[in-house]
Amino acid sequence: MKIVRHTELDVYKKAFSLAMEVFALSKSFPTEERYSLVDQIRQSSRSVCANMAEAWRKRRYEAAFISKLSDSEAEAAESQVWLQFAVECEYAHRDRVRQLYSSYDEVVAMIVHMIHHSEKWTLP
């Protein structure tokens, strides 16, 4: 199957789903965290997807493609950090966050695989 849009990528679908789960989880955070932890975790989780979309559109240039995927990978790792804070601050249950954290590990692995095999994704 030929992939035409970034939204067809399995990694994008997984990252988007995770961003929506993070959004739902962060709704229960205290109001005093609205402009710090809530904004940070939502922004980073959404940026995973946004950077993937940019990478997809820059795939004519392998270095630009890899750079945007690297940004996406970094945002996924940042999301994991904010999830850790949510647990330590007792805003989220450890088991639920463990599942999300693990899913972000999968997203990172998928992105790294794309980076290491960028020639399969970039345009001639």
Image (cartoon, rainbow, N blue to C red):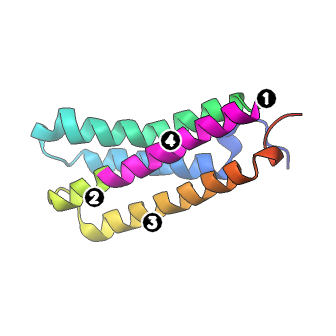
Nearest to N terminus: mark 2 or mark 3: 2
Q: Which residue is mark 1?
A: 60
Mark 4 / mark 3, whichever is N-terminal = 4
Query: Disc 4 and disc 2: Cα gap in Å?
Result: 17 Å
114 with respect to 75 (left or right): right
Q: Which residue is mark 2?
A: 84
The amino acid sitting under disc 1 is: Arg
Residue 119: % across, % down: 81, 45
Q: Is residue 17 magenta?
A: no
Image quadrant holding the C terminus, namely top right
**Which residue extends farthest left?**
32
Point out the frontmost of discs 4 and 1: 1
Local secondary structure at mark 1: loop
Q: CA distance from mark 2 to mark 3?
A: 12 Å
Q: Name the residue rendered at 62%, 54% in the picture.
A: 112
Q: Which amino acid type corresponds to the residue marked 3 in the rendered image?
A: Ser
Q: Are marks 1 and 2 in contact (CB under 8 Å)?
A: no
Q: Residue furthest front?
A: 63
Residue picked out by circle 4 = 48
Residue 111 x, y percent position in the rendering: 61, 51
Q: Which mark is residue 21?
A: none
Q: Which SS class for mark 3?
A: helix
N-terminal of the pair, mark 4 or mark 2, is 4
- Residue at 22% over, 55% down: 86
Residue 21 visible in rendering: no
Q: Measure how far apart labels 4 and 1 are at the Cα level.
A: 20 Å
Q: Which residue is mark 3?
A: 102
Q: CA distance from mark 1 to mark 2?
A: 37 Å
